[in-house]
Amino acid sequence: MQVTAKLHAILRRYRPAGIRDEGIPVEIPEGGTPRDVAAALGVPLELIHAVFVNEVQATLDTPLQPGDVVRLFPPVVGGAE
């Protein structure tokens, strides 16, 4: 099934070559999860701090449906002192 992945901040380095758009079509098995999306893109799980599916907070094990939008975020770093 196909879902759309959106990678944020440092995770953007895992976009496939030639993809400049934020939305990345990803094929995963039926009943797949954001964990499968990360694996398909080669994103190390330890770099993922937050997951959203269709703008709702989720986990790496949330079941996905065809057409879902999966947003992966790394930990927040930096900031004002």
Image (cartoon, grey):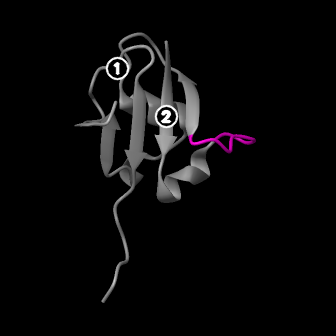
Disc 1: CA contacts within 10 A as few (<14), some (14-19) or many (>=20): many
- From the viewer's side, name the closer residue of 6 and 41: 6
Callouts 1 and 2 close, C-beta under 8 Å: no
Residue for badge 2: 5
* Residue 65, quarter of picture: top left
- At x 46% / y 14%, what residue is drawn? 29
Percent x, y for residue 4? 50, 28
Residue type of the residue flagged with mark 2? Ala
Q: Is residue 6 above or below residue 48?
A: above
Residue at (49% x, 12% y) in the render: 1
From which residue to which does the magenta span run? 16-22
Q: Residue at x 56, y 51 (%)?
A: 12
Describe residue 18's horizontal placement relative to residue 7 as left or right: right
Residue 75 x/y as whole percent: 34, 60
Residue at 61% x, 43% y is 15
Q: Position of residue 21 (x, y in %)?
A: 63, 41
Magenta-drawn stretch, dominant element (helix, strand or loop): loop
Residue assigned mark 1: 64
Task: Residue 73: say if magenta.
Answer: no
Q: Locate residue 22, reporting x and y percent.
A: 57, 42
Above or below, comparing residue 36 to residue 12 in the picture: above
Q: Is residue 19 magenta?
A: yes
